[in-house]
Amino acid sequence: MKKVVIVGACGHMGRVIADIVSGREDCTVIAGIDKAGGGAAFPIYPGFDSLTEKPDVIIDFSHPSVLDSMLAYCLTNGVPVVIATTGYSQEQVEQIHKAAEQIPVFFTFNMSLGINLMAELAKKAVAVLGGQFDIEIVEKHHNQKLDAPSGTAIMLADVINKSLDKPCTYVYDRHSVRAKRSKDEIGIHSIRGGTIVGEHEIIFAGRDEVVTLKHEAHSKSVFAVGAVNAAVFLCGKPAGLYAMSDMLADK
C-alpha cells in the first residue's frame, strides 16, 4: 500500500484524486498540503514542514508558486513526485529537470491517456504530411483557467516541432501583424468560456484537404486517474524524469 500526499488537496483536482485513491487497494492518502485546510478525511497541513509522516510519493495539482518548497522537501527526504500542475516558467521547468537528477519525477502537461495518444498520432501525421500542410492548434478551457495557451497545447506543439525537418516558430496573436501566414509557423489559439473541461485540436491544413486530430475531456477525473496511476508507477523507480510514454511502455 503506497502512502500518498496530495498537494492542493482542497482544490477540485485534489478532491477528485482523494476520491479515486479511496477506491483503490494499492495506495492510500495519508495527508494533504493546502493553505485552505480542513474538509478532508485525512490531515491537511499548510506546508511541508508540518508533515508528520514521510510519504512514498507526492501528487501535485496545485500552483507553480508551491514548486520551490515541494522540491526542497522531496530532495531532502528522497520522495518521488508526480507534477501535474501547469503554468510553469521556463526557469521552473529547468528546476524540475534538475531535481530529476536526484529523485524520480513524473512530469507532464497532461495526464490523460487520450492526449498522449493524440501526441503520438501527431508525430505520425507529421511524418506523412511533412511540410506540405499548415499546422494550427486550438485549445478550449473553462473561464477560470489562469494560463493561456494551455500547457497541453504547448506540449503538442513541441512534439510536432521536434518531428519536423525544419522547426517552426509559434505564433499566438495574429491580429497584431497584418501579413500572410508563413510556412514556418505553428499557430496556437486559446478559447476560454463556461465550464469547458478541456478540448485540444490539431489542424493540418493542405491544398483542398484538412486533417484534424481532436481530444475532448468531459470530466477532470481522466487527469486524476492518470496522476494516481503515475504515482503508483513512480514508487521504487530510480532517479530520473518520467512521462506518460514511460508508464505505457512499462505495461
Image: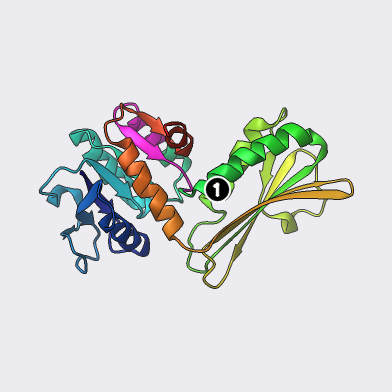
In which quadrant will I find the N terminus?
top left
Residue 25 image offset from top left, x and y in percent: 25, 50
Residue 148 image offset from top left, x and y in percent: 55, 56
Q: Nearer the viewer, residue 208 or 46?
A: 208
Residue sticking out furthest to the bottom: 194
User: Does any portion of residue 63 appear in the rendered image?
Assistant: yes
| Residue 70 inside the magenta-drawn segment | no
**Residue visible at 72% across and 29% down in the picture:** 166
**Residue visible at 37% across and 54% down in the picture:** 63
* Residue carrying label 1: 115
Q: Can you tell which quarter of the image residue 19 is in?
A: bottom left
Q: Magenta residues, as a range?
A: 94-110
Residue 111 image offset from top left, x and y in percent: 45, 48
Q: Secondary structure at mark 1?
A: helix
| Residue 95 inside the magenta-drawn segment | yes
User: Does any portion of residue 180 appear in the rendered image?
Assistant: no
In which quadrant will I find the C terminus?
top left
Q: Nearer the viewer, residue 90 or 83?
A: 83
In the image, is residue 87 above or below residue 250?
Answer: below
Q: Amino acid at mark 1?
A: Ile
Residue 221 image offset from top left, x and y in percent: 42, 59
